[in-house]
Image (cartoon, helix red, strand yellow):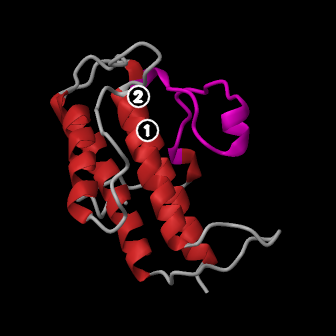
Amino acid sequence: MAVTAGLRLPAVKGIESFRVIEEVKGDATTEFGAPSTAATVEIQPATAKEADRVATLLDAAWAALDDVVAAAPAHLRKGPRGGGRDRDAMYEHVLGAEQAYAGKVGVRAQHPPPADDPAAIRAVREAILSMIRSDRSGAPARERGWSPRYCARRLAWHALDHAWEIQDRSV
């Protein structure tokens, strides 16, 4: 994803090159597999460069999802218990979540954009990206809202999680 975003990651020789800088307490959402808590860095003020990097990575995650959706068959292999959404229903779910998550950071989107309207999808996404790029406080935009960087991480995780699911279940 970083390559798609035009970003370079530092060279890494092995797992010892990584270090944990923070652990956050999880909850039921975390048990389900979704990030549910903002890390300390996600609620700190951001420089313009940091905010742009986060927005660029989120945009690359959306591009990856859109590419997977475009290449996938309409009907996906069913899950281990015989269930699961097909491609279009899953994509509409992700778009609906984007609209809901946008509200968590003060971006108004009336309705989830239709899956067959790329201009409407892009408009919601551009509004979210603009907010992420312009925020410098790191604080949630509203009471019980999300910080812009946490919102970006949650959106990117959600887009990629479903992109991988679509790929995995493509027949």
Tell me, for residue 169, which label it has, or none.
none
Image quarter of the N terminus: bottom left
Looking at the image, residue 118 sits to the left or right of residue 9; the answer is left
Q: Is 126 located above or below residue 38 in the figure? A: below
Identity, as a three-letter code, of the amino acid under mark 1:
Ala
CB contact under 8 Å: marks 2 and 1: yes
Residue closest to the eye, 12 or 78:
78
Looking at the image, residue 42 sits to the left or right of residue 171; the answer is left
Q: Position of residue 97 (x, y in %)?
A: 47, 45
Circle 2 SS class: helix
Circle 1 SS class: helix
Q: Position of residue 157 (x, y in %)?
A: 49, 49
The residue at which mark 2 appears reads as 104
Question: Which residue is at a point 42% across and 82% down the rendered structure image?
Answer: 71
Residue farthest along the bottom direction in this orientation: 171
Q: Position of residue 18 (x, y in %)?
A: 52, 43
Identity, as a three-letter code, of the amino acid under mark 2:
Lys
Query: What span is colored magenta in the figure?
Result: 17-42
The residue at which mark 1 appears reads as 100
Query: Main structural element of the magenta stretch: helix, strand or loop?
Result: loop
Q: Is residue 101 magenta?
A: no
Residue closest to the eye, 112 or 60:
112
Q: Position of residue 38 (x, y in %)?
A: 50, 26
Question: Which residue is at a point 71% across and 43% down the rendered structure image?
Answer: 32
Circle 1: is it few (<14), some (14-19), or many (20+) Cα within 10 Å? some
